[in-house]
Image: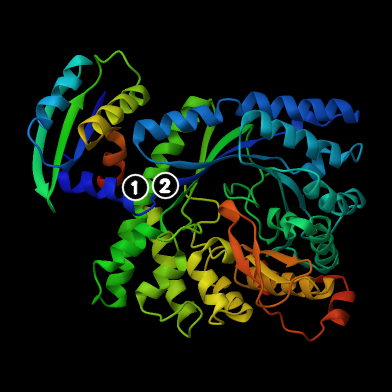
Amino acid sequence: MRAIVSVIGKDKPGIIAAVSGALYEHGINIEDISQTIMQEYFTMIMLVDISRCPLELAELSRILEEKGRQWGVSVRIQHEDIFNAMHKI
Amino acid sequence: MLTSKEIIETINMIDNQHLDIRAITLGISLFACIRGNAAETERCVYDTVCRRAEKLVPTAAMLSAEYGIPIVNKRVSVSPISLIGAPNSNYIGIAKALDRAAAACGIDFIGGYTALVHKAMTSYEEEFLNTIPEALSGTEKVCSSVNVASVRAGINMDAVALMGKVIKKSAELTAEKGGIACAKLVVFANAVEDNPFMAGAFNGIGEGDCVVNVGVSGPGVVKKALESCPGADLTEVAEVIKKTAFKITRAGELVAREAAKRLGAQFGIVDLSLAPTPVLGDSVAHILEEIGLESVGACGTTAALALLNDAVKKGGTMASSRVGGLSGAFIPMSEDIGMIEAAAKGALKLEKLEAMTAVCSVGLDMIAIPGDTSCEVISAIIADEAAIGVVNNKTTAVRVIPVPGKGVGEFVEFGGLLGRAPIIAVNPYSPAKFISRGGRIPAPIHSNKN
């Protein structure tokens, strides 16, 4: 199962390392990654494979959101189907 | 492959533009609960609702977390209680059982305290209609709807006359709360069987045992999309709305399918309605103003709303093959901050609202009128709306609240999603003789299609 991780917040050193470290901890593989600065905000999008993650997606979402709060950025993980549904015919 | 732009667009819609799944409504058939014994019927109704709906709230929470999209309301609709309770006329007992079941499952509302009397009322249905005020004032979460007209049958004016009295009595019994029972009571023409929105949801007699119907929303998303093209002509405006409606509907369909799978229910329909809330940035009126009106209610409002409604339907129909319910733009006065402002400053009047209902989904919705409005006037408002529905082949509805003790210009507060509304003026001339005639307004010629 694949999901999209999005990280949005003020740019500062170490965000990518922190996020990818947390994903690694939960057995999540990053398949694609892109980042950009939009209106002074750091925006990183990752396509990840969560099939080896032992946690439910809802639980994972709660953990990443909490970590994001500690790092001062917004981190969310969403099932990729919501994006595919809205943007693909 | 998804682009970053698409992903950010979705996140922005949810975070900043109030995109949400407005309602997941689980339709539950109660026909297996029809018993000769009143207590047995009540027990069966309670058990059936609890068994079917016990996982609704946790499932919605799980889906919301997985897809990252809020699911605002979790609701249940049941088979028309006028039929389920008929053998022993224990309608109030069933209403209370429904209310207890709704509280046990943690859902917001339970709809289906319903009668379908568009052609005629049986004696037990008439008895049922007279229990509505007590049922609504004696419960918290039960919602009621009555279908008084259809294209095929015409308008049952005896039922229309009775409903004026029922609405008035419902308001009086909840006078200390602004007549809130009326906010849970809808009078329909051409009611649909798979509507997920309250207060008019019921599980129609043509529906299955257990079905998931989902209502999406997103007035804020449409408004934001229009803000990005201020100089566009109206053909382009329609195009932008269509594309936005497509995306919103797709999100709804995904959630509906998944919810149905997890709840062991059928996937019924996605209702494409643009449903506002009293929150800023979630208003249908503000979309119309973005299209180019100084205030909703101005000349041009009906045309702009027709454009909006049509574009929403076209985008949504492309997005899902299971479109149903009411599907269009809602214009509930007390639940839309732009409508509230327009009515308060006198820009939006009852007559304009009535015209608007001819081109959008549903009808005169959540409109507060003076508490001293007579039963006959309320019945006549219902008759006018029913005529619009029957002649134009569409669903129309009336959910008006004659607020006890209040007059034009004053406000009534319902709180939460039901919002607040200014009390607006009703034409003072009497339709009493017209209403007292009773009988049935015959079906229009276009009903005879066979």
B238 sits to left or right of B132: left
Q: Can you identify the residue that label 2 sits on?
A: B20
Res B450 visible: no
Q: Amino acid at mark 1?
A: Ile
Q: Secondary structure at mark 2?
A: strand
Comparing B88 with A74, the one in front is A74
A60 sits to left or right of B288: left
Q: Amino acid at mark 2?
A: Asp
Question: Marks 1 and 2, Cα distance to the nearest angstrom?
Answer: 7 Å
Which chain's residue wears label 1? B
A58 sits to left or right of B272: left
Q: Give the quarter of the figure containing the N terminus of chain B.
A: top left
Residue B184, compared with residue B4, is above or below; it is: below
Which chain's residue wears label 2? B
Residue beneath the point at 83% across and 71% down: B375
Q: Can you identify the residue that label 1 sits on?
A: B14
Residue beneath the point at 40% across and 60% down: B281
Residue A10, compared with residue A78, is above or below; it is: below
Specify how the rendered protein is coloured. rainbow
Comparing B420 with B305, the one in front is B420
B235 sits to left or right of B371: left
Residue beneath the point at 11% across and 41% down: A11
Residue B247, compared with residue A23, is above or below; it is: below
Picture coordinates of residue B222 (x, y %)? 35, 61
In this rendering, do the residues under marks 1 and 2 share a single chain?
A: yes
